[in-house]
């Protein structure tokens, strides 16, 4: 299993409200871009770029290999023999909806969705096709989750050959800094966001039997 951690970006709790008052794509794009920039600028103040065990009297698992790239990206690698011949990749971005201001509520969750809607080197609609060609199913093997203090993107690779691993790491790299935030993709994703909002409401009221939305 490989976990990569980037300090400072975007996420949103599923149970929170989703504000879609902004109807113009250009406004939404500017709002999300501004939100992302705010978080990136705030990142050094949100967390020190060190592993949590540095401030603990408990030693880290010696089986985990910890490291940091020249660009500040941290990584942890753990050999996992079960299931055999597979790999789990996680990209954790260490900030979330707590960094939203009142007029930004919902943008973190929206931005998480946009990670699957086009980037610099992967046009809109191609990411899922690339993953499917590698044997991954959207939802089961490819997903993301949001919270108050983090966003986590997940890829469960069915094989560990060099090409599959390179593809998985490339897609997480695109997610980390290369999203295009196309205005047309915003409009296409609004219905999905609202569906998740309705499902979240049903869960809190005990009427979630028909909800099976991946986010």
Image (tube, helix red, strand yellow):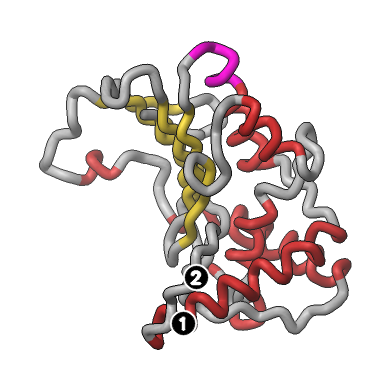
Count the marks: how many? 2
> Could you say whether the residue bearing mark 2 is in a helix, strand or loop?
loop
Q: Nearer the viewer, residue 5 or 169?
A: 169
Residue at position x 12%, y 40% in the image = 58
Where is 63 relative to 21, above or below? above
Q: Is residue 140 visible?
A: yes
Q: Which residue is mark 1?
A: 202
Callout 2 environment at 10 Å: few (<14), some (14 to 19), or many (20+)? some
In the figure, is residue 61 to the left or right of 17?
Answer: left
Q: Whole-percent x and y of residue 21?
A: 75, 83
Looking at the picture, tell me which residue is in the foreground, 189 or 43. 189
Rendering quarter of residue 100: bottom right
Q: Which image quadrant is residue 193 in?
A: bottom right
The earlier-in-sequence mark between 2 and 1 is 1
**Magenta segment boundaries in residue numbering:** 161-166
Relative to 57, residue 187 above or below = below
Q: Which mark is residue 102?
A: none
Q: Residue at x 73, y 69 (%)?
A: 190
In the rendered structure, the answer to whether residue 83 lies left or right of residue 45 reads left
Mark 1 crowd level (few <14, some 14–19, many ≥20, 10 Å Cα): some
Instruction: Characterize the magenta stretch by its predominant secondary structure.
Output: helix
Whether label 2 touches label 1, CB < 8 Å = yes
CA separation in Å, label 2 and label 1: 8 Å
Q: Quadrant of the N terminus?
A: top left
Q: Which residue is mark 2?
A: 211
Image quarter (top left, top right, bottom left or bottom right) of the C terminus: bottom right
The residue at the point 87 percent across, 74 percent down is 24
Residue 32 is situated, as x and y percent measured from the top left of the image, at 72, 64
């Amino acid at each position: 299993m490989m976990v990569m951690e980037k300090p400072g970006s975007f996420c949103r709790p599923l149970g929170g409200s989703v504000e879609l008052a902004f109807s113009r794509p250009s406004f939404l794009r500017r709002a999300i871009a501004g939100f992302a920039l705010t978080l990136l600028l705030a990142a050094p103040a949100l967390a020190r770029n060190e592993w949590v065990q540095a401030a603990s009297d408990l030693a880290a698992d010696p089986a985990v290999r910890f490291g940091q790239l020249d660009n500040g990206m941290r990584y942890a690698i753990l050999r996992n023999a079960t299931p055999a011949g597979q790999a789990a990749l996680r990209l954790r971005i260490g900030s979330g909806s707590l960094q939203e201001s009142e007029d930004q509520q919902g943008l973190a969750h929206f931005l998480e969705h946009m990670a699957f809607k086009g980037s610099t080197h992967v046009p809109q609609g191609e990411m899922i096709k690339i993953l499917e060609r590698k044997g991954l199913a959207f939802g089961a093997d490819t997903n993301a989750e949001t919270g108050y203090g983090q966003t986590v993107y997940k890829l469960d690779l069915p094989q560990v050959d060099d090409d599959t691993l390179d593809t998985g790491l490339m897609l997480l790299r695109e997610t980390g800094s290369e999203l295009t935030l196309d205005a047309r993709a915003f409009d296409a994703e609004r219905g999905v966001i609202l569906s998740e909002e309705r499902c979240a409401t049903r869960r809190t009221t005990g009427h979630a039997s028909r909800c099976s939305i991946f986010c």
